[in-house]
Image: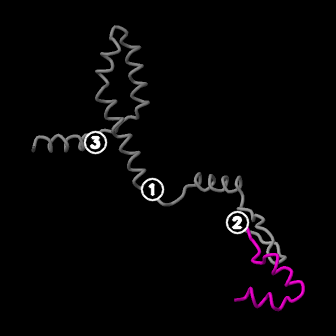
Amino acid sequence: MSNGKKLTGLKKYLDDILPFDTPEKVKEDMMEYARENPDKSDAEIAEDYRATLTRSLRKTSAAQEETVKNTPKNVPTKRMKNRKKELQSMTGKTAMMRGGMAGGKQHMYVAGGSVTDKMNPGLRALNATRPDVVKKILKS
């Protein structure tokens, strides 16, 4: 158990005192080494640079994770804001739809429902002669 802790401490110590290269830099070094040593196979070159490449990839991914951890989660980015504006401009506001006529008035609804009169043909005929009676009937 203590041996694992010693190795972890050693890795951290080496990471602090030795700067790490980016994976692109390690690949360039590998290509240069391959040109200088044409007698070595690709597998031998990869084995020689395996530890360096692994370390650079580990440090690069750790730096990226640290960046992600430090960014707030609920704050929309510029890209998200622009996308939202773009979608709103494409769809536009929900238009009012024609609902129908009721009581001689045009009604509009956002959801597109319909309006019907409460007056049957008999009430319409009565409304022509006695509108005050029809108002009392519909009121109750």
Image x and y of residue 70, in percent: 41, 56
Specify start and end residues of the magenta stretch as a single range. Answer: 112-140
Q: Which residue is mark 3?
A: 17
Which of discs 1 and 3 lies nearer the camera? The answer is 1
Magenta region, main secondary structure = helix
* Structure colour scheme: one colour
Of the two numbered discs 1 and 3 on the same chain, state the one appearing first in sequence: 3
The Cα–Cα distance between marks 2 and 3, rounded to whole angstroms, is 73 Å
Which type of secondary structure does the marked residue at label 1 adopt? loop
Q: Is residue 70 left or right of residue 123?
A: left
Image x and y of residue 72, in percent: 45, 59
Q: Are marks 2 and 1 in contact (CB under 8 Å)?
A: no
Which type of secondary structure does the marked residue at label 2 adopt? loop
Residue drawn at (71%, 55%), measured in percent from left and top?
89
Residue 93 or residue 70, whichever sits in front: 93
Disc sitting over residue 102 in the figure: none
Q: Quadrant of residue 27?
A: top left
- Please give the count of numbered marks on the rendered protein: 3
Image x and y of residue 59, in percent: 34, 40
Q: Which residue is mark 2?
A: 113
Image x and y of residue 36, in percent: 38, 13
Q: Is residue 73 left or right of residue 16?
A: right
Q: Residues within 10 Å of mark 3 (few under 14, many from 20)?
A: few
Residue farthest to the left? 2
Residue drawn at (79%, 74%), measured in percent from left and top?
102
Q: Are marks 2 and 3 in contact (CB under 8 Å)?
A: no
The Cα–Cα distance between marks 1 and 3, rounded to whole angstroms, is 28 Å
Residue farthest to the top? 39
Q: Which residue is mark 1?
A: 71
